[in-house]
Image: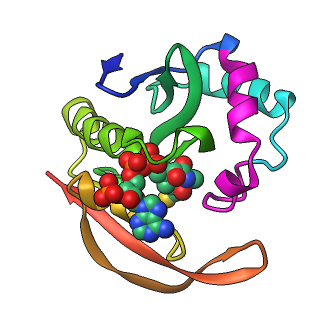
């Protein structure tokens, strides 16, 4: 799979992405918006471990955001189980030096379409923390609908936060 877009390419991760991945992922401003599963500091060993794990997974659901032949971010879905098997949670991040160029708005829209066309999904949702208006805006621009505020849903960096539920349905 390769989605060649105007501002970036979405492609499978490769083992040789480790250096670039660690460089862009090792940023507190990225970590603060993500699950604690995303390491901080993000070492080269973390990058190797992630790539080894991800590359062998089938179906492939986690992808690299590539700008000018460099791995500078990630986007992926986690498909639900049981009664939620037609639902997936979307996650994404981008290296700080690429923020504000419209890259993720374009990527989220195209990737969501790809997911609806390639997986048996009827719903893709995301839950940005309420203190992340840029991510909420990305979802709105990609056509996601705001469904509600999940109060006290997240404990991040010692702070109890609300999160915002956005979804796109087919
Ligand atoms: C959030 C993130 C993905 C945005 O990516 P990006 O490529 O910079 O986003 P885009 O440039 O496509 O769009 C950002 C939009 O948010 C807006 N925005 C940025 N900061 C904002 C703020 N503080 N308040 C309101 N809107 C804001 C921008 O103006 C832009 O909207 P516009 O085009 O209408 O002007 C990126 O900053 C990131 O990776 N952050 C860390 C990880 C993260 O938050 N992941 C998502 C977890 S749910």
Q: Along the horizontal axis of the image, is 56 left or right of 86?
A: right
What is the residue that sits farthest to the bottom in this orientation? 151
The residue under the point 25% across, 45% down is: 121
Q: Along the horizontal axis of the image, is 161 left or right of 125?
A: right
**Residue 86 versus residue 44: which sits nearer the camera?**
44
Q: Which residues are magenta?
A: 17-38
Q: Along the horizontal axis of the image, is 117 left or right of 72?
A: left
Q: Position of residue 79 (x, y in %)?
A: 41, 46
Corner quadrant of residue 82: bottom left
Q: Along the horizontal axis of the image, is 141 left or right of 134?
A: left
Quarter of the image where ligand 1 sits: bottom left
Q: Position of residue 115 (x, y in %)?
A: 28, 36
Is 57 above or below relative to 37? above
**Is residue 126 at least partly visible in the picture?**
no
Is 69 above or below relative to 93? above
Inspect the magenta stretch and tell me whether residue 33 lies in it.
yes
Corner quadrant of residue 110: top left
Q: How is the image coloured?
A: rainbow
**Is residue 74 at least partly visible in the picture?**
yes
**Residue 49 versus residue 100: which sits nearer the camera?**
100
The residue under the point 75% across, 31% down is: 22
């Amino acid at each position: 799979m390769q989605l060649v877009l105007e501002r970036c390419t979405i492609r499978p991760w490769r083992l040789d992405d480790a250096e670039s991945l660690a460089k862009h992922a090792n940023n507190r401003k990225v970590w603060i918006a993500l699950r604690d599963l995303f390491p901080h500091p993000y070492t080269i060993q973390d990058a190797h471990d992630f790539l080894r794990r991800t590359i062998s997974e089938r179906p492939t659901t986690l992808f690299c955001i590539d700008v000018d032949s460099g791995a500078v971010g990630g986007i992926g879905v986690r498909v639900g189980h049981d009664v939620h098997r037609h639902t997936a949670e979307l996650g994404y991040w981008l290296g700080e030096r690429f923020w504000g160029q419209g890259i993720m708005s374009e990527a989220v829209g195209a990737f969501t379409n790809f997911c609806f066309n390639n997986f048996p999904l009827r719903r893709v949702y995301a839950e940005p923390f309420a203190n992340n208006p840029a991510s909420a805006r990305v979802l709105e621009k990609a056509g996601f609908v705001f469904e509600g505020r999940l109060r006290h849903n997240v404990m991040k960096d010692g702070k109890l936060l609300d999160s915002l539920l956005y979804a796109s349905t087919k």
